[in-house]
Amino acid sequence: MNALLEKIVADCGEYVSQGRVATYIPQLAVADPDKRGIYIVSDSGEEFSAGDCFDRFTMQSVVKPLILMQALMDSGIEKVQALVGVEATGKPFDAFNYSDQALTGAHINPMINTGAIALCTLIAGETYEIKFARLLELARLMAGNPNLEVDESVYLSEKETGSKNRALAYMLKAYGMIYDPVEEILDCYFRTCSILVDCRDLAKIANVFAHHGMNPATGERIFPKEYARYVTATLATCGMYDGSGKFALDVGFPAKSGVGGGIMGVIPKRMGIGVFAPALDKHGNSVAGVHMLMKLNQEMDLSIY
Ligand code: GLU
């Protein structure tokens, strides 16, 4: 298995030049586009890996399923759905051009920025520091890694330059969807995006989703099955930005990507996968990362469809 993964990592090097590392958050621009890694945690707890799988990168949008999960655990399905819908938008993750005159929950979903920013308000906690601490704790628990931390330089870089997210958050406020101070909500959001992980962490987090909230490593239930299905179904339809339909055809399992170059793949009841390769396509998906998952699916028949 490790030999297969090594081959996949090597073969996918040819796709790197088709992508570009993200630059709109200045600190992400320093990433080395040639890095590539993959990590798998299987049902039986076996672990396989190849390439730069222990290089660390920031979660960015890969944290959105965790924001959704924490909001579900703290506020329940009804409140979550009243605030943020579940339909794919078919638009970029930071799109402004809502076609109607008013912005409503039906126009957004948890995997785009507006949805994730709104959901931060449904996390329990007196302050946004406490809400963030709860999210970090969930990430640590799912990854089985108590050392997960924020990359301060990426966090500050996004905080300094995040005008677009500020604009999106003020739009949510203007339409009465959020009430708390925008800067506090965004501070929590920017911190969660800047949590540092490696491919192993992503594979372990994905494996908990794959096992419906049960941590297969410890037998501990972290969240109810009902919520796991909610999040995983959202990943299937919206997890790969406005490339989610093509990803469903080409690869065929729930996944979430981030502009740091990471992707987590959830194979229900079978395994969790983490891949990393920082050069992105026009949607924000890691080009080599998607190809690694595509080849893995061809070899192991992982598509759920
Ligand atoms: N922190 C990034 C942003 O809000 C996350 C985007 C992403 O990974 O899609 O722009």
Image (cartoon, rainbow, N blue to C red):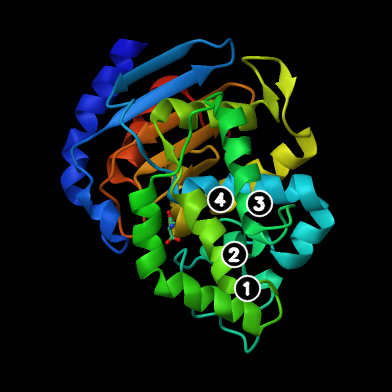
Check the image and name the residue furthest to the bottom: 101
The residue to which callout 4 is attached is 64
Residue 181 numbered mark, or none: 1
Location of residue 171 with respect to 68 vertically, above or below: below
Disc on the earlier residue, 2 or 4: 4
Q: Amino acid at mark 3?
A: Lys
CA distance for labels 1 and 3? 14 Å
Location of residue 278 with respect to 212 vertically, above or below: below
Question: Is residue 57 shown left or right of residue 224?
Answer: left
Label 4's element? helix
Q: Is mark 1 within 8 Å of ligand 1?
A: no
Residue 185 numbered mark, or none: 2
Find residue 167 and report its horizontal and vertical position in percent. 49, 78
Q: Amino acid at mark 1?
A: Pro
Label 2's element? helix
CA distance for labels 1 and 2? 7 Å
Mark 1 vs 2: CB contact within 8 A:
yes
CA distance for labels 1 and 4? 20 Å
Find residue 186 and report its horizontal and vertical position in percent. 53, 64
Q: Nearer the viewer, residue 282 or 30?
A: 30
Disc on the earlier residue, 3 or 2: 3
The residue at 64%/79% (across/down) is: 173
Question: Is residue 2 shown left or right of residue 164?
Answer: left
Mark 1 vs 4: CB contact within 8 A:
no
CA distance for labels 3 and 4? 14 Å
Quarter of the rendering containing residue 137: top right
The residue to which callout 3 is attached is 131
Q: Nearer the viewer, residue 50 or 91?
A: 50
Disc on the earlier residue, 3 or 4: 4
